[in-house]
Image: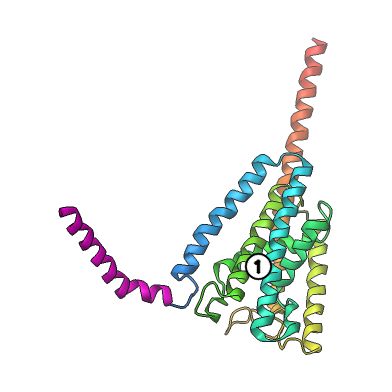
Amino acid sequence: YCKLIIFQIIYYIFIIFKRMFMNNLLLSAPKVFGWQHLTFLAIFITLGILSVILIKKYCKSENSIKIAIKIYSSVLLFFILFNRISVAVKDNNFWHFIPNTFCGISSLALAICGIFAKKDSPVFHLFVYNGLLGGLLTMIYPDFLGQNPSFFYPATISGIMHHTILFFLSITIIVCKYMNPSLKKFKFLALGLCIMMVYGQFLMSVGIYDSAMYINKPVMEGTIFTWYVTEIIYLALVFVSLLIVSLIQKKKEKSKIESNETTLKTNDSLHQN
């Protein structure tokens, strides 16, 4: 009898809590850093980190790494196609299937390249960097969350999913050395961004989009961060990062050579004695 009373008390507390709080919580529109967004980040950042660790740990041969990249890329391809179809249906415009953002075109291109391109292909030196920066920023601050009251609205969930997968696929490609960041290949990033700007201008000139690649519209409303500003900052950031990596690598190589020379001299001295 006491257990029944305790159960009823807990049950009524739950009903009161549900009526007072949970209904409003579940029906509230998703927003950046809201409970739905934070829950998503907690789950998928954990899964993303685990995926990178497991691939790095168990994929030792070049062939196994290639297979893992192809599978990861296929998942990304599914979500970016799902996203583009969702956006086209939402806008009731067939031509909006064509990506008009850095992350959209980067997700599509990196997914295709991950499946078909060879190791350390020049295209990776464009889209992997785009994926690292664009994927991370949009995953943390997805400004499209409020487009529908449901977090699982197709254009919303597919959008945040493809950005998240884009980011972790880019990390996996670098960690598994499927692409070697190189200052010598920085030119492919600069050239690729110029091509992307021409692509954006084309989309606007033929009337598919009023704004594309943030050429006319800033990344964040009320700021100066249009294409022309963000491109310079982005290129400078990547260049400096690659320069630092290059200097560290040269220092390590120099230390290794000096260590080998010291060892050889020591061995020669021992032989002479």
Q: How is the image coloured?
A: rainbow
Name the residue rendered at 53%, 80% in the picture.
148
Q: Is residue 130 visible?
A: no
Where is residue 242 drawn, in percent x and y?
A: 72, 56
Relative to 210, does residue 50 appear above or below in the rendering? Answer: above
Where is residue 79 drawn, in percent x and y?
A: 67, 66
Q: Which residues are magenta?
A: 1-27
Quadrant that contains the N terminus: bottom left
Relative to 70, does residue 78 appear above or below in the rendering? Answer: below
Residue density around tag 1, few if under 14, some if 14–19, many if 20 or more, within 10 Å = many
Q: Is residue 121 left or right of residue 13?
A: right
Name the residue rendered at 32%, 70% in the picture.
18
Residue 170 on the magenta span: no
Secondary structure of the residue carrying numbered label 1? helix
Relative to 254, does residue 85 appear above or below in the rendering? Answer: below
Q: Residue flagged by tag 1: what amino acid is it?
A: Gly
- The foreground one among 141 and 70 is 70
Check the image and name the residue furthest to the front: 1
Residue with the mark numbered 1? 134
Where is residue 84 drawn, in percent x and y?
A: 70, 75
Majority secondary structure in the magenta region: helix
Q: Quadrant of residue 158?
A: bottom right
Q: Is residue 6 left or right of residue 42?
A: left
Check the image and name the residue furthest to the top: 273
Name the residue rendered at 37%, 75% in the picture.
23
Q: Is residue 174 left or right of residue 10?
A: right
Relative to 148, does residue 135 appear above or below in the rendering? Answer: above
Q: Is residue 201 left or right of residue 131?
A: right
Name the residue rendered at 15%, 54% in the picture.
2
- The foreground one among 60 and 242 is 60
- The foreground one among 255 and 55 is 55
